[in-house]
Image: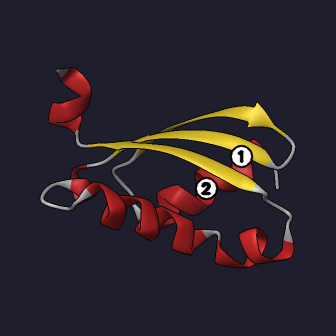
Amino acid sequence: MTENEVIARIISALPDASVEVSGADCHLTLNIVSETFAGKALLARHRSIQALFKDELASGELHALSLVTKTPNEAAA
């Protein structure tokens, strides 16, 4: 899965999101900022992103996702 495909999938689910991707191959770090995360616990935020890549994680196409999920206010602090 390419970096652009990862970003496109997140943006399709969270249109207001700002997404930065780092890493290579099947180990990616995603830094995502979205107002959608407001009021959600960290675990709920991460599960919502992992659900977008359920098939790729199950197949091994993506082996690991390291997630940083923040609201715009949290990111600005």
On screen, residue 21 versus residue 77, left or right, reads: right
Q: Residues within 10 Å of mark 1 (few under 14, many from 20)?
A: few
The local secondary structure at tag 2 comes to helix
Of residues 57 and 18, the one drawn nearer to the viewer in this rendering: 57
- The amino acid pointed to by label 2 is Ala
Residue appearing at x 55%, y 66% in the figure: 50
- The amino acid pointed to by label 1 is Asn
On screen, residue 66 versus residue 16, left or right, reads: right
On screen, residue 49 versus residue 40, left or right, reads: right
Q: Which mark is residue 30?
A: none
The image position of residue 2, as x and y in percent, is 81, 48
Residue appearing at x 60%, y 62% in the figure: 9
- How many numbered markers are drawn? 2
The image position of residue 58, as x and y in percent, is 76, 77
Q: Quadrant of the N terminus?
A: bottom right
The part of the image, by quadrant, that contains residue 18 is top left
Give the farthest residue toward the top.
77
Q: Which mark is residue 8?
A: 2
Of residues 76 and 43, the one drawn nearer to the viewer in this rendering: 43
On screen, residue 56 versus residue 20, left or right, reads: right
Residue appearing at x 86%, y 63% in the figure: 61
Task: Check disc 1 and report the residue beneath it.
Answer: 4
Q: Is residue 29 above or below residue 7?
A: above
Q: Is residue 59 above or below residue 62?
A: below
Query: Are the residues tagged 1 and 2 within 8 Å (C-beta)?
Result: yes
Q: Is residue 30 above or below residue 65?
A: above
Q: Quadrant of the C terminus?
A: top left
CA distance for labels 1 and 2: 6 Å
The part of the image, by quadrant, that contains residue 8 is bottom right
The image position of residue 21, as x and y in percent, is 62, 36
The local secondary structure at tag 1 comes to helix
The image position of residue 53, as x and y in percent, is 64, 69
